[in-house]
Image: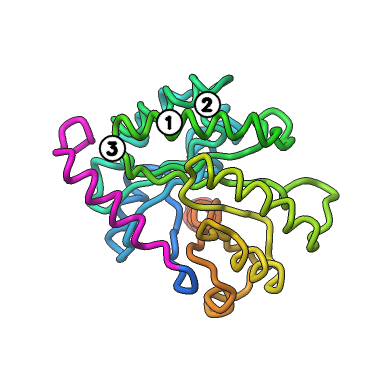
Amino acid sequence: MTLASTPRSTAAAKADTFHALHVRGRPFVLLNAWDAGSAAAVAAGGAPAVATGSWSVAAAHGVADGEQLPLDLVIDNARRIASAVTVPVSIDLESGYGADPAGVAATITRVIAAGAIGCNLEDSEPVDGSLRDIAVQVARIRAARAAAAAALPRFFINLRTDVFFRKGVAHDVAAVELALERARAYADAGVDGLFVPGLADPALIERLATASPLPLNIMATSATPPLDVLARCGVARVSHGPGPYAQVMQALQAQAREVYAATSA
């Protein structure tokens, strides 16, 4: 069932539920899904919400990340996921699939109609990963917020800043201050959450979580501190990104090797 066929109050209630999950110091965990089947499995396992990861969705469709997957497929995938689960659904929209603010607004309108109550948006260019100028990104956010206000006012915009994803950038206090500068500007523009992938140092995470005007989302990797440490640092949300997809594909490949080795024996 998509938003188009769901009472507005139901979508609003899901959006409210999703907002309420973001509590500083009590992080909730997202095992990122990539299609309706994986979303249903995660939800059946007890997840309070489902979120996609763009890398996994792209890989599942046989293309690279970086808005290489056509937007029509992204929206159709979102619709199928929202129809497969009853929990809130947030969709990774990368940089918004828009060359300008109007394009980003159109994307937000479409994903809300597909049944999503939240999204991830990035502040880097999909072509080369370079950070957008803050003013340019703020204009894109304001357009997204205005589109959401017209369709689902509590739509959750989780803004991913790629400050710590840039090659050769030191993970230090200066980088945290750069991320905070962006967080403050994005909060003023109407963002609901801050996603900072690549950051793994507990002291820097705590510094960012404490000073950020937005609840902090960290991505789980082999270098990320345990959940209890992230909680003490003030993190509100932990995403697993491409990890679940990679693990499932590795397990499938291992099974295939076992099956076909036995067949050829």
**Residue for badge 3:** 115
- Whether residue 20 sits left or right of residue 68 in the image: it is left
Q: Residues within 10 Å of mark 2 (few under 14, many from 20)?
A: many
Position of residue 80 measured from the top left corner of the image (x, y, whole percent): 29, 37
Label 1 vs 3, first from the N-terminus: 1
Q: Is residue 32 magenta?
A: no
Q: Indicate the quadrant containing the C terminus: top left, top right, bottom left or bottom right.
A: bottom right
Front of the two marks 1 and 2: 2
Q: Which of 221/255 is in front?
A: 221
- The range drawn in magenta is 1-23
Q: Which of 199/145 is in front?
A: 145
What amino acid type is highlighted by mark number 2? Tyr
The reply to whether residue 254 is visible in this rendering is no
What residue sits 71% from the left and 73% below the top?
203
**Residue for badge 1:** 74
**Residue for badge 2:** 97
